[in-house]
Image: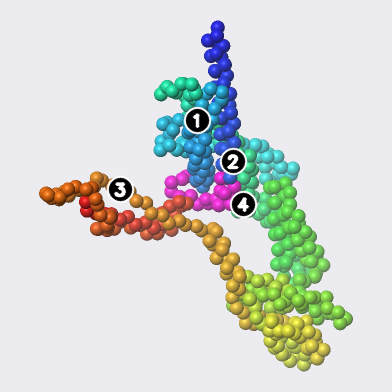
Amino acid sequence: MNNEVQHGMNQQQIETLLAKTRIDLTQIINQAGINALQYIGSHPVIIPSEDFDSAESCNQQRLKNKISSVLTNYLKCNYESDEITQNEFIINADFTKLSDNHIPTQSISIRPIVMKLKRPLSIPFFGPEQEQLLPVYYQVTVNIPLIINSKNTHETEPLHSTDLTVTTVLTTRYLGLQHLISSFNESLRNLGPFWRTMTLLTNVYSMARGYRHYQTGSPQNIVDNNHLELITNLVFLFEEALTFGGINPSLLIDAVKQTKSVFSGETMNNLSSVNSLTSSDWMVSFSDLKESFAEETSTDEQNSKQQLVNISDIASSILWNQTSIQLEFINENEESKIVTYQIDSSKSLEDTVKEYQDKNWVLKGSFKGESVQNQSTIQNINSIAESMYTASFSTEVNRKGPCSIYEGEHNGFPIDNGSSSWVISNTTRMSQQTIPEKGTISPGSIVFEEVYTIEWTRSH
């Protein structure tokens, strides 16, 4: 009876120990998986190498590799030296069953958890589907070999050996967001709601404008680019609302402003505001014009003639800092004058324009003058490039084959086991690998490698 009670108590202690171990390893796998998904989400593989059928399988393999690495290190630190105990029992990882003392990725299975997405609105024929099954989470299952021993015994054979199955759900919605974005992208690329709505509205728009032109002779252009731009932006918001069930507020505000501007006939031209002032007060601040702006690289003749004072254009700084601005004025006799304004001048641009307006000159337009490279932007681009593309350099030394020993004569001399230093006697390059062909490079691949055979000798 006592043996049965003792056996039951031992069994309960072992089950408790396994339960604690499962909870502990579940947290480690979950944390490693979430961190890996966060990195993979910001650095995804879009075009896989030949070793993978798709980008999804490649990214899943990257997830498995990360979980395997973190879990192996954790087992070596905590489950190798009798650190996890429960009363008289000790639990350790059975590294004898692991190849190279490492959790193999083959023992890690990843299964997507599918959930039903129900959109608040779906239009027949236009789509998208109101109810759609999308993978949202990853379920990760790992088989870990464990052995349980007793503190009181020193037997070579373990008391209990088992493969513990640990399952966890990676509670990050990267997978669901990825499929939503892919669905939105497919709709924009294929004949989805975006192009169907765009085709319908543009056909109705062009037919209405064409009929009006046929009846009245106006407008001269049946299609107005400003109207088409507005239609495109509104249809884009419509597609976003259908796919995600919501609209970006900032895009909605911009669309409302653009709609008001198109239907009211207002133009986003600061030059008209300057020339239409009825008082001496300035409604446009020229202080921002001292900020640098991008150099116009286009050689289009029309663009070079229509460069007016546009604060949003002049103030934007990308690759070039503007050092001067060419201001063109015209008087009542249609005579024009070009004035060069230096941006670093102590005299403000506002005072310069006002000075010529007081002389009955009207500001007609502006042109970009001299410019210099924006060094801060170049530094930012270099910083981004360094963070996006990383490489490492390493050297691996493998000793192959036995040492060659050539015995000398020791007649009359004692052997004192002394020796000289190792000296490189021969170096031969065996092979060299240069940069692989474009499209064959994958994360972790070798882009340059040289293999040498080196011989060391020393005398005894």
The answer to whether 162 appears left or right of 9 in the picture is left
CA separation, marks 4 and 2?
30 Å
Identify residue for label 1. Answer: 82
CA separation, marks 2 and 3?
39 Å
Identify residue for label 4. Answer: 185
Is 51 placed above or below 273 here?
above
* Residue drawn at (46%, 45%) of the image: 52
CA separation, marks 3 and 1?
35 Å
CA separation, marks 2 and 1?
24 Å
Q: Is residue 51 magenta?
A: yes
Q: Is residue 400 magenta?
A: no
Q: Residue 303 lies in what quarter of the image?
A: bottom right
Identify residue for label 3. Answer: 399
Circle nearer the viewer, 4 or 2: 2
CA separation, marks 3 and 4?
53 Å
Question: Which of the marked residues, 2 or 1, is nearer the chain's N terminus?
Answer: 2
Magenta stretch bounds: 36-54
Identify residue for label 2. Answer: 31
